[in-house]
Image: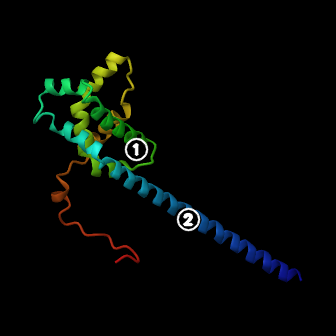
Amino acid sequence: MSLAVSIFELVGAVALTIGVFVGVAQLRQHAIMRRREGMLELVHSLQKADMTSAMSLIMRRGTELGPDEFREFVRGDDGWPFVSQVCGTFEALGALVYSGEVDLDLVTSAFGGAVTRSWGVLRPEIEEARQRLGWPRLYEWFQWLADRIEERDLCAPRGPAYEAFRDWKPIARRGVR
């Protein structure tokens, strides 16, 4: 009887150990999926009409709008919502990168140009607003994100993706054809 009890205890211990390993593996897989879904949601939010309109306005600065025209527009009732949309989105994105919820490499690859260009265009207006409002932390994570992306570009400069990764081959994934 004691041999049978020992065998059952051993089987129970093995089953428990296997269960723990399976649980840990499932938690890791869940975290990977959660991050992937978060990035997809982020991509979708940056592709919505109001964000693309706001980005279009900012990207036109320097080509169609001079500094004075842009400043007038940004400070007016018509322009500030556009600026707030972009700044708020990149502010949240910066905080998510800082907290480790979103990968900086992926953000740099997908949105780096938009973030750094937007910061370059909006920086004078944001810095002036910080002074005027006495709010030095206004859009602090947007600035932090732009600075990190620019640092990465200085440390590892590369050309455009269509040139730099011309010889790219997809990674074979198990079970996916």
Pointer 1 or 2: first along the chain:
2
Residue 71 placement, left or right of 102: left
Q: Residue at x 23, y 44 (%)?
A: 113
Residue drawn 34% across and 52% down? 44
- Label of residue 26 in the image: 2
Vertical relation: 24 (above or below) 85: below
Q: Residue furthest right?
A: 1
- Residue at the spot 28% in from the left edge and 20% down from the top edge: 128
What SS does tag 2 mark? Answer: helix
Vertical position of residue 54 compared to residue 77: above or below: below
Q: Is residue 111 above or below residue 121?
A: below
**Would you place residue 28 above or below residue 124 in this image?**
below
Query: Picture coordinates of residue 122 (x, y %)?
Result: 24, 30
User: In the image, which disc is placed on residue 155?
Assistant: none
Q: Which residue is mark 1?
A: 97
Q: What distance separates the C-alpha of mark 1 from that of mark 2?
A: 24 Å
Q: State the colouring used for the structure image.
A: rainbow
Q: Is residue 37 left or right of residue 109?
A: right
Q: Amino acid at mark 2?
A: Gln
Q: Amino acid at mark 1?
A: Val
Of 105 and 38, nearer the camera is: 38
